[in-house]
């Protein structure tokens, strides 16, 4: 580099040092928030994982959409798969891109989870999504798409019910708070419902304390499947929420060990492990219960950790926006979302 180039570089460097680091960080990490939903808006329904083969599945979806007074458009390839067979990658990508390109579509809801979302990740047009930010909603296998889209496009997406979910009153409440309001969702806590003399949805504090940070996470199996790829989860300074279903304790232990060894857990500010249905089965290869696994893997992190919030594969389910700021109160089993997710 000649003297003129050196001088120019020095001037630019001095100019950058005059900009507060906080401002640089905020500019670099600025979230792109989708527009809030309103009654009468049109939403797109896609099946980026497994397609459906039973017409009653479509009826379940339309019942939900009619309840919220939403117009809808189904993707060309949500229906017609044989059994659990997914449509081709190119067909599922086509549905996704069409919905993000269509100006009439205000939000994109996944019809179901299943299997196959990671197959799409290196084919997605992330610039298209960034230029057309919309509410994107789903969970389970859809976790792969959430992690990729938030990382590559910078938009807020939503971990929440698919259109085939039960949509209890509890689920409806948080669905509305997340998608139909420009206000922060606020406090998320389990409903105080009794099952006889016992609380139906208890939580358990694994390590006490209060933590703050942006939200990331999803299905544990999917999080682990993306490790070592360009789309792997970023947990530094975050509140990590995790959920799964039907995984034996030794499998949960294996996946948490992977995240521990990779440093993903130690980098977090706090952890919410959602209610894990059918994850405490007896095993002939492992003597520990789910609670023992969680204690062994998470207590030594010495960060706030709570188990049992209604995230993911549960009849009662919350909707959680990715990346927005939240506070975890592990002692009281509460997750407070402090930042709005929609504009």
Image (tube, rainbow, N blue to C red):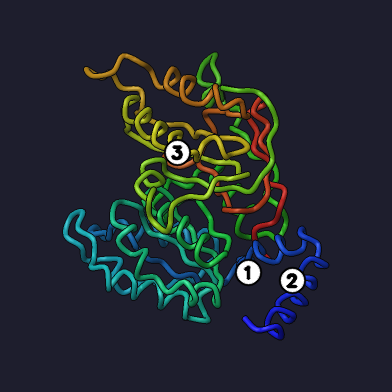
Side (left or right) of 305 relative to 283: right
Residue 322 percent coordinates (x, y): 57, 53
Which residue is labeled 3 in the image? 243
Question: How far is the residue under mark 3 from the one under mark 1?
Answer: 27 Å
Residue that lies at the very extreme toward the front in this rendered image: 3
Which residue is labeled 2 in the image? 13
Disc 3 element: strand
Quadrant assignment for the N terminus:
bottom right
Side (left or right) of 108 relative to 205: left
Residue drawn where x is 41% and y is 66% of the image: 45
Residue drawn where x is 57% and y is 71% of the image: 40
Residue 134 found in image quarter: bottom right
Residue 181 found in image quarter: bottom right
Residue drawn where x is 70% and y is 83% of the image: 3
Disc 1 element: loop
Residue drawn where x is 33% and y is 57% of the image: 118
Work out whether mark 3 precedes mark 1 in sequence or the reverse, and give the earlier one. Answer: 1
Question: How far is the residue under mark 2 from the one under mark 3?
Answer: 45 Å
Residue 33 percent coordinates (x, y): 63, 65
Please name which of the two marks, 2 or 3, marks the residue nearer to the observer: 2
Work out whether mark 2 precedes mark 3 in sequence or the reverse, and give the earlier one. Answer: 2
Which residue is labeled 1 in the image? 35
Residue 52 found in image quarter: bottom left
């Amino acid at each position: 580099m000649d003297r003129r180039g050196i001088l120019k570089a020095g001037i630019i460097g001095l100019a950058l040092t005059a900009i507060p680091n906080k401002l640089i960080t905020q500019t670099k990490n600025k979230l792109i928030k989708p527009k809030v939903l309103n009654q009468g808006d049109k939403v797109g329904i896609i099946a980026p994982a497994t397609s459906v083969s039973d017409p009653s599945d479509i009826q379940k979806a339309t019942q939900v959409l009619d309840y919220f007074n939403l117009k809808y458009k189904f993707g060309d390839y949500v229906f017609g798969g044989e059994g659990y067979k997914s449509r081709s990658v190119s067909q599922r990508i086509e549905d996704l891109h069409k919905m993000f390109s269509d100006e009439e579509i205000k939000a994109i809801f996944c019809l179901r989870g299943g299997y196959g979302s990671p197959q799409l990740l290196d084919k997605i047009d992330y610039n298209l999504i960034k230029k057309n930010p919309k509410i994107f909603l789903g969970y389970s296998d859809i976790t792969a798409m959430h992690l990729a889209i938030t990382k590559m496009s910078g938009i807020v997406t939503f971990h929440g019910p698919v259109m085939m979910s039960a949509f209890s009153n509890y689920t409806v409440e948080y669905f509305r708070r997340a998608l139909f309001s420009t206000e922060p969702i606020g406090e998320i806590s389990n409903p105080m419902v009794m099952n006889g003399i016992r609380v139906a949805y208890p939580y358990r504090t694994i390590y006490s304390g209060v933590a703050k940070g942006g939200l990331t996470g999803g299905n544990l199996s999917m999080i682990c499947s993306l490790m070592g790829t360009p789309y792997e989860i970023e947990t530094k300074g975050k509140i990590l929420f995790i959920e799964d279903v039907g995984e034996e304790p030794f499998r949960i232990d294996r996946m948490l060990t992977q995240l521990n060894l990779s440093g993903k857990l130690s980098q977090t500010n706090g952890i919410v492990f959602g209610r894990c249905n059918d994850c405490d089965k007896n095993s002939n290869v492992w003597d520990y219960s789910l609670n023992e696994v969680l204690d062994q893997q998470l207590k030594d992190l010495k960060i706030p950790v709570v188990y049992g919030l209604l995230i993911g594969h549960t009849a009662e389910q919350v909707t959680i926006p990715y990346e927005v700021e939240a506070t975890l109160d592990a002692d009281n089993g509460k997750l407070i979302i402090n930042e709005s997710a929609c504009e």
